[in-house]
Image (cartoon, rainbow, N blue to C red):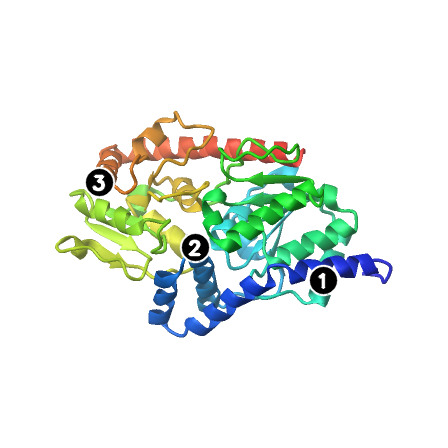
């Protein structure tokens, strides 16, 4: 980047954005680095976390440590591009997301266009940020979709806005005000609204159909996440009869104990594969539990293919990627009421939805209901629903991005 761009206003905006959120984010990051020495300590972080969002950030830190993800910005990671949709109208879009937030990364990488992963935990240096801005300005991208906020994302938006790129910046918050019980989530969400009000970005979207704020730059209706581009395998070749899969962490929001308990009550389910490290059920239900440690996204896809049914009747979600990934593979996923604003009358929703996600009986009945459908018929229903959902996603992103 030439010196003319690095003016006083530019430097000031970066410094201002870097100063905000520093204390709280550095505090939990330092705590996570100290506490994650072994599996026992990692579980203790999750058990003692004061809120769902704090748990999620601790989990993200654990994932970073375990998978040794890079903290340097990464352009067009082949693992992400391999799963992207080839939508021509999105070819000049740049999706920016975070290494550590796996659910949001999965959602962003499934969209078309270019990809840029930055860290949510390790602060970008001034030179890293300046280099990123220079690369973006010199690139062919016409629009930038920022997926959620962090200190680094805020600094990137501020720098690009200072250079006159506000009309190319679109911000998607993958969460809702339910998560505002946590101070960090509350801070980044209110900051997103502040960016919209101050015209630092062109449009803001909060991914919950019932969210509303009186501002013309807030986009409604709800954006749908897109499914990854995956090859379908034959269920006859891969499916292991009677296996239920739950990949959620053991936190309040994911409700994994209710899911596992309800599935264990079903006589149709012989094994429950779970990724949470410490799920416990009373005997004899506990004999059905099989722990499968969290691994790569491709490993999760392999488990989806081998399972008969997936479980994600969670307490609150926006548009959960695990459900979408299961459906992309032709597998039904038990869900709570997502309160979506499209496709709610599709027969797949009635088949898989649990009204009271704390009721193990309802979860059991939903699993039995799904597994009573002939496999070929079930697979066709699931794929029909996901195809329709992807069409909604594509159309609404076109409207959001005005392309």
Horizontal side, residue 394 vs residue 65: left or right: right
Q: Is residue 356 left or right of residue 133?
A: left
* Along the viewing direction, whichever of 56 and 368 lies nearer the viewer: 56
Left or right: 66, with 158 as reference point: left
Q: Residue furthest left?
A: 284
Instruction: State the CA–CA distance, disc 1 to disc 2.
Output: 39 Å
Of the numbered discs 1 and 3, the one sitting upstream in the chain is: 1
Q: Which residue is mark 2?
A: 298
Per the image, the residue denoted by label 3 is 364
Distance of mark 2 from mark 3, alpha carbons?
28 Å
Residue drawn 72% across the image and 62% down it: 15
61 vs 194: above or below: below
Q: Position of residue 342 (x, y in %)?
A: 46, 28
Q: Which quadrant is home to the C terminus?
A: top right
> Is residue 286 visible to us here?
yes
Along the viewing direction, whichever of 35 and 178 lies nearer the viewer:
178
| Between discs 2 and 3, the one toward the N terminus | 2
Pick the residue in front: 229 or 31.
31
Q: Which percent across, then down, holds residue 124?
A: 65, 65
Q: Earlier in the sequence, mark 1 or mark 2?
A: 1
Q: Which mark is residue 15?
A: 1
Disc 1 crowd, CA 10 A, few/some/many (<14, 14-19, 20+): some
| Discs 2/3, front | 3
| Front of the two marks 1 and 2 | 1
- Residue under the point 74% across and 48% down: 140
Nearer mark to the viewer, of 1 and 3: 1
Q: Secondary structure at mark 2?
A: helix
């Amino acid at each position: 980047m030439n010196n003319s761009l690095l003016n006083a206003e530019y430097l000031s905006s970066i410094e201002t954005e870097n100063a905000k959120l520093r204390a709280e984010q550095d505090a939990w990051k330092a705590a996570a680095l100290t506490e994650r020495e072994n599996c026992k300590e990692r579980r203790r972080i999750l058990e003692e976390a004061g809120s769902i969002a704090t748990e999620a950030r601790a989990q993200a830190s654990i994932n970073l440590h375990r998978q040794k993800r890079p903290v340097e910005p990464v352009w067009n990671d082949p693992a992400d591009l391999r799963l992207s949709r080839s939508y021509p109208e999105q070819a000049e879009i740049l999706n920016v997301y975070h290494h550590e937030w796996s659910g949001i990364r999965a959602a962003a990488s499934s969209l078309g266009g270019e990809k840029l992963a930055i860290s949510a935990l390790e602060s970008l240096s001034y030179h890293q940020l300046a280099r990123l801005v220079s690369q973006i300005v010199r690139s062919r991208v016409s629009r930038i979709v920022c997926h959620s906020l962090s200190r680094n994302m805020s600094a990137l938006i501020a720098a690009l806005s200072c250079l006159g790129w506000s009309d190319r910046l679109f911000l998607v918050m993958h969460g809702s005000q339910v998560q505002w019980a946590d101070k960090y989530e509350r801070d980044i969400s209110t900051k997103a609204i502040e960016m919209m009000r101050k015209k630092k970005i062109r449009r803001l979207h909060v991914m919950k159909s019932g969210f509303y704020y009186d501002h013309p730059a807030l986009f409604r209706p709800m954006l749908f996440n897109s499914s990854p581009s995956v090859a379908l395998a034959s269920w006859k070749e891969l499916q292991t009869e009677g296996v239920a899969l739950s990949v959620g962490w053991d936190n309040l929001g994911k409700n994994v104990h209710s899911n596992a308990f309800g599935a264990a009550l079903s006589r149709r389910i012989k094994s429950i594969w779970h990724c949470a490290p410490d799920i416990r059920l009373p005997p004899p239900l506990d004999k059905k539990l099989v722990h499968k440690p969290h691994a790569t996204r491709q490993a999760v896809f392999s488990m989806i293919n081998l399972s008969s049914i997936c479980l994600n009747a969670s307490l609150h979600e926006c548009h959960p990627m695990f459900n979408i990934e299961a459906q992309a593979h032709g597998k039904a996923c038990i869900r709570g009421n997502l309160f979506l604003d499209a496709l709610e009358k599709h027969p797949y929703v009635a088949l898989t939805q649990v009204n009271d996600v704390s009721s193990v009986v309802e979860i059991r009945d939903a699993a039995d209901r799904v597994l009573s459908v002939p496999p070929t018929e079930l697979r066709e229903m699931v794929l029909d629903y996901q195809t329709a959902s992807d069409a909604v996603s594509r159309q609404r992103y076109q409207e959001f991005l005005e392309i």
